Every structure is written in C-alpha cells, then in structure tokens.
Amino acid sequence: MDQKIKYGYWGVRGAGQVGRLLLAYTGATWENVKYTTREDWFDKDKKGLGFQFPNLPYLIDGDFKLTESRAINSYIIKRSGKTELLGKNLKDEARVECLIGVFTDVRTALMPLVFDPEWKNKINDAVAKITPKLDELSKFYGDHEFSLGYLTLADFYISEFSHYVENIAPEVYAKYSFLKKTRNAFEALPEIKKYYAE
C-alpha cells in the first residue's frame, strides 16, 4: 500500500498549488494540510515538525521531510515514476527547465501585485515588463496544448499561473491564447478534473 504523504501549505493556491496538482495527477496517497492561522505554522509546526529548512510548502513521506517547492515537485514526480513530466530525454529535460525559468521571470514580475493594494497603479508597468517573455512563450507553444507536445511540469506551472493572469490582467489573458488553451487541456485531464471536483 502506498504510504500517505503529508503536504502542508497555507489554505490558498499560491506556491503550494503545483505540488497539490502533481500529487493528484500522479495518483499519490496524500493528506492536504492547510494552515489557516499564523500561529499553527509559526508557533507550532515550523518549530515542531523537525525540518532542516523549515518552510511552506513542505512534504513529509514517512521519515523523509522536505521543503522548497522545486525540490518537492521533482521528488513527487520521481517518486511516482512519471518522469516524462520532467522531459522524455536529455534535451527535453533541458527545455522544461528553460521554460520554468522563463515562467519564473514572468511570475516574479506579476505576483507581487496580488497582495499590493496599489496594484491597479502598477499593472501597466508589470504588463510591459512581462510582454516580451509572453511573446516568446506564445511562439514556443505555437499550436500545441502542452509545451513540448506532451504534458510536462512546465504546463503545470503555466496552467496554474494563467488563473492569476486572468484575474489581474484579463486583457493579457485574452491576448495570449496559449494560456487558455493549456489550462483547458490541463484541467480536462481526468486526474485534475477529479481534484477540482472534490
């Protein structure tokens, strides 16, 4: 029987959502630990769970404890045996890493606005900053639903990020059709559909 994983993060999507989606997609047996108060994490579990580098999200697999989302995501994929999510060969693995790097640049420019009360005054500058990268991503995706013509970790990131783009800059979401196309294809996957239905 598959050992149950504990996956902890705040009760929001944020940096923890890709890990949740990976656990759902790979068929892991897992418990979704959601923190709703600062006290539960900072005063209790951050000190008490025995992490070498305490942070959220975290993953506990038996006596193995891990933090940092990139490391966690890679661990979930390799643990499941679905390593094609990292790329089917050496070159595709490099392409996936490259895409995640480009995506991270876009995310870094846009995500601070989510929590900024003055975000409406800053959105135009952020959009101007991310437009060249989105142009490049759009060209790379082309007519594909998924970045490499098959599902990879990069598509998990892009699909999840598309929700933020749609809410903060709907005109950008409408302009870059690959965001909607990838999200629709991703959320139509049976495992992902089931996760969002629960």
Image (tube, grey):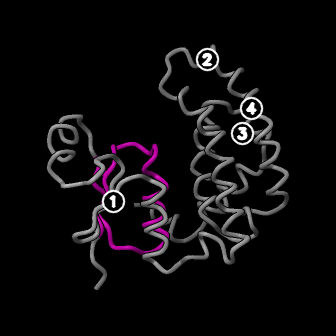
Task: Say which label, 4 or 1, has the lower sequence index.
Answer: 1
Task: Say which label, 3 or 2, has the lower sequence index.
Answer: 2
Labels 4 and 3 touching (C-beta < 8 A): yes
In which quarter of the view is residue 135 placed?
A: top right
Distance (Cα) linking label 4 and label 3: 5 Å
Instruction: Look at mark 3 in the image and give the residue it sits on.
Output: 173
Q: Which residues are magenta?
A: 5-34
In-front residue for pair 81/138: 81
Q: Secondary structure at mark 1?
A: strand
On the image, the x and y values in percent for residue 46 come to: 21, 45
The kind of residue on which mark 2 rests is Lys
Label 1 Cα neighbours within 10 Å, binned few <14 / some 14-19 / many ≥20:
many
Question: Please, is residue 40 above or below residue 169 in the view?
Answer: below
Q: Residue 171: which disc?
A: 4
Task: Confirm whether the magenta stretch covers residue 164.
Answer: no
Labels 2 and 1 touching (C-beta < 8 A): no
Q: Secondary structure at mark 2?
A: helix
Instruction: Look at mark 1 in the image and give the residue it sits on.
Output: 66
Question: Please, is residue 110 above or below residue 198 in the view?
Answer: above
The kind of residue on which mark 4 rests is Glu
